[in-house]
Amino acid sequence: MAKYSAPTTGYTDNGGLVQLGANNPSESWDYITVPKPNQPWRIVVQGDLPDIGTTPSMSVTVFDGSTPLFSASGTWQVQGQTSQYANKKNWKFKLRNSVTGNKLAVKIGSWFPMSSIDVKGYGTDRALVRDSLTTHVWRQMHSYPNGRLAPLSAYQYFDRTDLGVHASALFSTTGFPVEIWRNGSFLGLYVLRASNDPDAYLMDDGNDQHILIQPQKAADMWTSAFSSKEWDFTSPDLGKNYDTGADVSTINKDVNDASARFITWMQKCYSGELDIRATYRSYIDLTSFLDYILIVELSGSMDALTNNWMGGSWNGTPTSGIWHIWPYDEDATWGLTSPINGVGSDAENIGFLTGNNSKADHNPGFFNTVFNKFRPELRARWRELRRAGVIDAKTITSWIVDYVSKIDPDMMKADLANWDINGATGSIDVRANPGKQSVSYIIDYATKRIAWIDTQWGYSA
């Protein structure tokens, strides 16, 4: 007997095109694979719409065109902190196999399996492009020239357990557009986004030296003593007693102290107490930080200075360890730069966000130290990536066109009708930036921003 209500959204009889045998095993599968789509999926949901703090039951079927890929039962809820205050919210689907009652994991193309599927409404970025574009460009940058996003040793770690088939680790997120239909009506266009779990960073959450952290409420991280309560610890697994905001020093002191060592060193470099050039080799992978600053500057990611980045180490201890940094949640980019609105946040006007005269409302702190102390290396890395065609307006334009061509213009019209572009649908007031909500604006921003940085750093193609 089924442990969960059978899905009501899929085909029970597909016209005889597919016949299931009496011993069909698929009903007992708790893990399925589906190809990455070449067109937006249509996600059909039946159930009450979640509100903040509610998790109503739902039935869902995912369609590729008119072909059903899979059906599931489960619950859904509002996803993300900022989304709670937006009109067009993000959703998290928690999937279950209705027969076994177990979590249903879905592997999409090369992504790692997900039993929770996040769809982002991007009330701030109605074109649905910016987040995936930013992390895509960063991956192209950081994988040049050796094709890897991490040291070889990070990949080799898994050789003994699964022959190292973690090679598709994204070190951030990516996504593709989907349509969501609820109870027979069009709800909106969203982006189904890859997970941000430890697997995505080649982290073994059973290894205390595999540490992955993210600032959550650490707005004064560059000047105040490290407090684990202001950070989210994704890896290692700290057990059932841990939730974001807990005091990690009482749960796993070594992990707490390893993280404090990293943050405290950055603070001392920023204050001038330590010489960053004399000490950085014992603390950070420099190229990782150079590429992070370059993607912040290229995309205009103001919200990535004291927020929206992930820090990680594969050998973190209270006395040693090399740390890397990765971008995350990059929808407030490419001209959408709080609190600057209008022409002030255009590509030629925003200046260097990690520079000495930053217009950012977040303190660039340690990133400003890197910007100043490693200016020759930053300019050399920019020149290298420009000459290789990795940072290139034509390349970025081509990716944007391929991405948005998957969206049916009629569905975008319907999305705009459901969620007024003049409404307060995101953390940045879209009413102050109506002209920035088009694909053409993002393409133009990329072209002008590259040219502006070229001019500042004396690069000529």
Image (cartoon, rainbow, N blue to C red):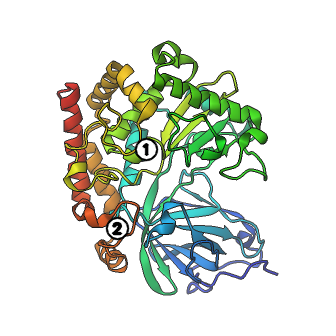
Instruction: Check disc 1 and report the residue beneath it.
Output: 304
* Residue 374 visible from this viewpoint: no
| Left or right, 370 with reference to 8 | left
Is 30 above or below relative to 318?
Answer: below
Residue at 74% x, 70% y: name it. Answer: 25
Q: Looking at the picture, which amino acid does disc 1 mark?
A: Ala
Instruction: Check disc 2 and report the residue beneath it.
Output: 407
Q: Nearer the viewer, residue 23 or 314?
A: 314
* Residue 354 visible from this viewpoint: yes
- Density class for disc 1 (Cα within 10 Å; few <14, some 14-19, many ≥20) is many
Q: Looking at the picture, which amino acid does disc 2 mark?
A: Ile
Q: Quadrant of the image for the N terminus?
A: bottom right
Q: Quadrant of the image for the C terminus?
A: top left
Picture coordinates of residue 19 (x, y %)? 64, 80
Residue at 57% x, 39% y: name it. Answer: 167
| Left or right, 102 with reference to 174 | right
Picture coordinates of residue 121 (x, y %)? 44, 66
- At mark 2, the secondary structure is loop
Tell me which numbered mark, 1 or 2, is placed earlier along the sequence.
1
The answer to whether the residues at label 1 and label 2 have Cβ atoms under 8 Å apart is: no
Picture coordinates of residue 49 (x, y %)? 55, 80
Is 276 above or below relative to 239?
Answer: above
